[in-house]
Image (spheres, grey):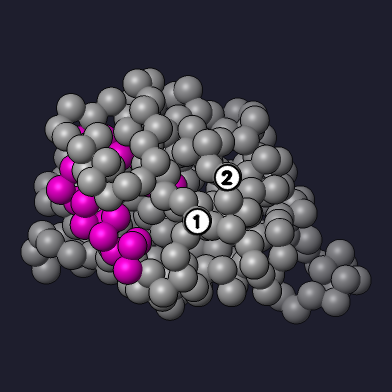
Amino acid sequence: MPTISVVIPSRNDAPMLSACLAAVQRQTRQPEEIVVVDNGSTDGTDAVCAAAGVRRVPLDVPGIAGATAAGFDAAAGDILARLDADSVPPPDWLERVEKILEAQGPMTAVTGPGDFYGGNRLTRWIGRTVYIGGYIRVVGLLLGHPPLFGSNFALSAPMWKQLRERVHRDLPQVHDDLDLSYQIRPWMSVLYDPTLRVGVSARPFDDWSGLRRRLVMAWQTFDLNFRAEPPLARRRARVPSGPARRARGDRG
């Protein structure tokens, strides 16, 4: 049986982190460790981690990309499962993640959507339709495979070892999930399972400034990666067209 580490970056989210940790501790398949990357919190996140008995990794360098990378580097599990501090996974989340990755092989990541809680009907609709729906469809078309959703994904430790030097962990303006998705190599794959859902707070969409900030970060992340690896060339390496697809027996 593979071991599982759950990695949760957090910055000044103590109440939501407490709820997230409680949900992880109710899993039908318990993880071997829970790693919380405390990204410079000043709100008692350390006390929440101590009360829950989880491993806390302090990181003063700001940015979600660096926090995620530090958590994956520190984790000891064969499977690295990623949640946000406001994620609330259902009890069978880790059990399903483990089964999916065992069936797919070591160079596959799995991700799923979020069910937004809090806010109002409009903000939940924006989160579900514009943010997650648009992200999966539009970015997936560009990448040639589904993108990872940061509040709900997992990958193997060997896969991370091949990608860890490629991510932009020192830049606070980078979306970690989008950046990691862009680094996926042609021999790797991402499985999107629409039934693998977790609860996610709708608070980023309570006002347009929150949505705008996320869109600006997405553009900055793309711009950075486009310069290093042109998107059309990257997509061609993953999505053969015409004769190449027919030759290998794909249906398109």
Q: Which mark is residue 81?
A: none
Q: Amino acid at mark 2?
A: Ala
Query: Which residue is tagged 1?
Result: 32
Q: CA distance from mark 1 to mark 2?
A: 9 Å
Residue at 50% from the left image edge and 74% from the top image edge: 96
The local secondary structure at tag 2 comes to loop
Q: Is residue 225 magenta?
A: no
Q: Amino acid at mark 1?
A: Glu
Q: Which x, y percent locates residue 212?
A: 25, 41
For the record, the magenta segment spans: 7-26
Q: Residue furthest right?
A: 247
Q: Which x, y percent locates residue 115?
A: 28, 68
Q: Nearer the viewer, residue 77 or 134?
A: 77
Q: Nearer the viewer, residue 34 or 66?
A: 34
The answer to whether residue 31 is seen in the rendering is yes
Q: Nearer the viewer, residue 112 or 102?
A: 102
Q: Residues within 10 Å of mark 2 (few under 14, many from 20)?
A: some
Q: How many numbered discs, if any? A: 2
Residue at 42% from the left image edge and 49% from the top image edge: 34
Query: Which residue is tagged 2?
Result: 76
Residue 196, quarter of the rendered image: bottom left
In this view, 244 is above or below 230: below
Q: Which x, y percent locates residue 81?
A: 49, 55
Question: Which quadrant is the C terminus positioned in?
Answer: bottom right
The local secondary structure at tag 1 comes to loop
Question: Which quadrant is the N terminus positioned in?
Answer: bottom right
Answer yes or no: do the residues labelled 1 and 2 have beta carbons within 8 Å?
Answer: yes
Q: Is residue 20 left or right of residue 5?
A: left
First along the sequence among labels 1 and 2:
1
Q: Residues within 10 Å of mark 1 (few under 14, many from 20)?
A: some
The answer to whether residue 221 is seen in the rendering is no
Residue at 39% from the left image edge and 41% from the top image edge: 55
